[in-house]
Image (spheres, rainbow, N blue to C red):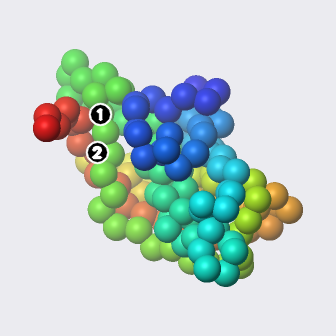
Amino acid sequence: MTGKAFPVTIPFLHWIGIKMVEHGAGRATLELDAVEHHQNSFGVAHGGVLMTLLDVAMAMAGRSLAHVDSGEIGVSANEQGMVTIEMKTTFLQPAHGKLVATGHCLHRTATLAFCEAEILDERGKMVARGNGTFKYIRQRKISA
């Protein structure tokens, strides 16, 4: 899948301004134009913004494989979701401007995906890396 649409509605990502560039075959690429409201007190992208980019890039990479061998007959790819079990982040240098996060799924089992991601800034410099473990779940609607 290519374009600017996520496979599911995630209001937080819309609010923060993250856009989907590519999603499929165990990979995902996201973009964010880091502007003033994304900054910390040093005037660079806040670590939480970077962690969100890494988390979502990895989850979307793993999610793109959710329908493969899911073991659940009749469950569509849109019903199969992911939750983060654990995540490690390494911040390499300050980030600003247009940020591109690329994630890919290294390995998956019937219930887990092991993924990694990196973020490049507008100069093409790597600013952060992450890896994480994600659990496949059947997505449920939560009513208020």
**Residue at the extreme top:** 74
Q: Quadrant of the C terminus?
A: top left
Residue under the point 19% across and 32% down: 141
Residue 115 at least partly seen: no
Disc 2 and disc 1 in contact, CB within 8 angstroms: yes
Identify the disc placed on residue 136: 2
Position of residue 31 measured from the top left corner of the image (x, y, whole percent): 66, 47
Residue in the picture at 57% in, 45% down: 18
Note whether 123 is above or below 42 in the view shown: above
Q: What kind of element bears circle 1?
A: strand
Going from N to C along the chain, the mark reached first, 2 or 1, is 1
Q: What residue type is labelled 2?
A: Tyr
List the residue tagged with mark 1.
80
Nearer-the-camera pick, 141 or 133: 141
Q: Residue at x 67, y 81 (%)?
A: 42
Q: Quarter-wise, where is residue 20 in the image?
A: top right
Q: Please name whichever residue, 70 or 98, is drawn nearer the observer in this view of the structure.
A: 98
Q: Is residue 40 above or below residue 134?
A: below
Q: Is residue 85 visible?
A: yes
Task: Indicate the secondary structure of the residue bearing disc 2.
Answer: strand
Percent x, y for residue 98?
75, 54
Q: How crowded is mark 1: few (under 14 residues within 10 Å), some or many (20 or more)?
A: some
Farthest residue, direction left: 144
Mark 2, other Cα within 10 Å: few <14 / some 14–19 / many ≥20: many
